[in-house]
């Protein structure tokens, strides 16, 4: 597909379980971003990748959250020992521009519900 | 740190009314400014952008001017349509150093026929 692809689109899990969210960016896009959108809230920045390295991890809310990117392409966001406050839509975006002037292309998100 | 503040919603207008959604920002450098839109059931998409002071971004009848003196980037449209009902996000991105894009809280717009 031509766009940013995220999976799963919907995930319901029990408190304390680990979850993995996947993002497949647009081919050739070197920059990749993860955001979190809670109900009625704006977008909260989590982490940014340029290639496989993450120069800015400042938004990860706790050490239960981690992310990696391999081959300059697919990225995985992992949340360990999920809590109810982790319930949100997790959005991935990619950009062809390594600086801040370019457009972000967003996926449709992974909705996480922690019971 | 950098931040974006936009007017709270929801905003409810009748079709053909004039729209303004206010957005102000705080940044240490000279950021690029963006408006993104999220239509019901769809992902976020870029509406318009401006990369330097006094630039005007425009698309689909919407426009916004980068005002460095007032640190603002207000979104305007002269005549809204029902199809403009969506959530609008103002955002900024620094052009050097950290490249993350920071978003405002979003403003939901309802347009009535």
Image: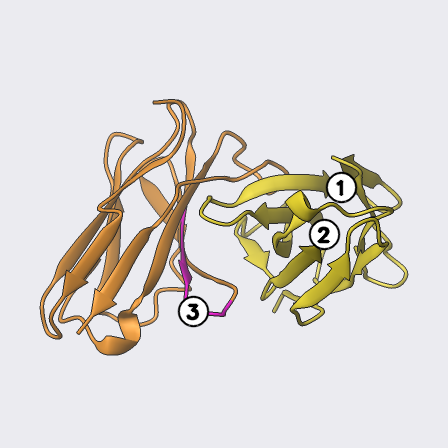
Q: Looking at the rendering, in which quadrant would you find the N terminus of chain B?
A: bottom right
The numbered mark, 2 or 1, whose residue comes first in the sequence reads 1
What's the residue at 43%, 42% (across, down)?
A: A93
Image coordinates for residue B43, horizontal then vertical, percent = 46, 44
Circles 2 and 3, Cβ within 8 Å, touching? The answer is: no
Circles 1 and 3, Cβ within 8 Å, touching? The answer is: no
Q: Which residue was labeled with disc 3?
A: A39
Image coordinates for residue B49, horizontal then vertical, percent = 71, 41
Q: Secondary structure at mark 2?
A: loop
| The stretch drawn in magenta includes residue A38 | yes
What's the residue at 71%, 69% (across, down)?
A: B7
Return the chain for callout 2: B
Q: Is A97 above or below relative to B76?
A: above
| The stretch drawn in magenta includes residue B37 | no
Q: Which mark is on residue B50?
A: 1
What's the residue at 50%, 29% (across, down)?
A: A96
Q: Which residue was labeled with disc 2?
A: B113
Q: Which chain does the orange colour mark? A: A
Numbered range of the magenta stretch: A33-41
Chain B: its colour in the image is yellow
Q: Secondary structure at mark 1?
A: strand
Disc 2 with disc 3 on a shared chain: no
Q: Is residue B86 visible?
A: yes
Few, some or many residues within 10 Å of mark 2 (<14, 14–19, 20+): few
Q: Is residue A107 left or right of residue B63?
A: left
Few, some or many residues within 10 Å of mark 1 (<14, 14–19, 20+): many
């Amino acid at each position: 597909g031509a766009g940013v692809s995220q999976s799963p689109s919907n995930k319901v899990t029990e408190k304390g379980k680990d979850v993995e969210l996947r993002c497949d960016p647009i081919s050739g896009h070197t920059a990749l971003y993860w955001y979190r959108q809670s109900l009625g809230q704006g977008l909260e920045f989590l982490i940014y990748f340029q290639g496989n390295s993450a120069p800015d991890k400042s938004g990860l809310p706790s050490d239960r959250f981690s992310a990696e990117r391999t081959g300059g392409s697919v990225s995985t966001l992992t949340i360990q020992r999920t809590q109810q406050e982790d319930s949100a839509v997790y959005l991935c975006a990619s950009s062809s521009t390594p600086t801040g002037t370019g457009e972000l292309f967003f996926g449709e998100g992974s909705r996480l519900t922690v019971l | 740190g950098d931040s974006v503040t936009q007017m709270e919603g929801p905003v409810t207008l009748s079709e053909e009314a004039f729209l303004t959604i206010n957005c102000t920002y705080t940044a240490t450098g000279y950021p690029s400014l963006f408006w993104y839109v999220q239509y019901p059931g769809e992902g976020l998409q870029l509406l318009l952008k401006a990369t330097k002071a006094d630039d005007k971004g425009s698309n689909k009848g919407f426009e916004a001017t980068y005002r460095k003196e007032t640190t603002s980037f207000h979104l305007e449209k002269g005549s809204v349509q029902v199809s403009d009902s969506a959530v609008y996000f103002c955002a900024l991105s620094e052009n050097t150093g950290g490249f993350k894009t920071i978003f405002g809280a979003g403003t939901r717009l309802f347009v009535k026929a």
